[in-house]
Image: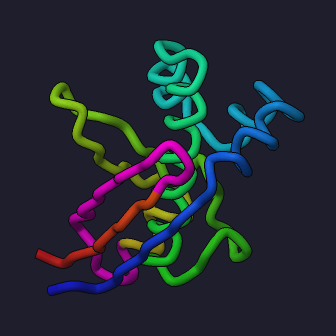
Amino acid sequence: MIKGIGVDLIDKSRINAVYSKHGSRFENKILSLEELNELSTKSGLKKISYLSNNFACKEACSKVLGKGFSEGIKFKDIEVLRNDNGGPFINLYGEAAVRAENLKINHIHVSITDTKESSVAFVIGESI
């Protein structure tokens, strides 16, 4: 049963501006250690795409959880990684994991698409 749906669209220029201003401080604020490891393999525009795609996923997932980032869920509580085939998946920690458990969400589906200008993420929380 579907328990929550979230979608987010973000302009890569916005992420690029924040990243240009704050650099590694921005990375460390929103990314887990594993995400930082994945990011370290990227450079240039691929780095901005990774940051933008993950940011959109985290925003979409926070919508699935019905809380957003203003009520205790932190960016690092939502981890977006890629499997061996490049497919994204989400791990939840901290308050995000607690909220998912309270909502009886035990499976999360995520899809990301991007263009040169923007990133879109679609996330579904499900109880199986």
101 relative to 50 in the view: left or right: left
> Camera-side residue: 78 or 50?
50
41 relative to 44 in the view: left or right: left
**Which residue is located at x 77 percent, y 35 percent?**
19
> Camera-side residue: 18 or 110?
18
> Camera-side residue: 118 or 42?
118
Quadrant housing residue 33: top right
Q: Identify the residue at the far right of this view.
A: 21
> Camera-side residue: 55 or 97?
55
Q: Position of residue 98 (x, y in %)?
A: 46, 68
**Which residue is located at x 29 percent, y 47 percent?**
89
Q: Identify the residue at the far front of this view.
A: 116
| Residue 25 vertical position relative to residue 125 in the rendered view, above or below | above
| Residue 97 vertical position relative to residue 35 in the rendered view, above or below | below
The N terminus appears in which quarter of the rendering? bottom left
108 relative to 60 in the view: left or right: left
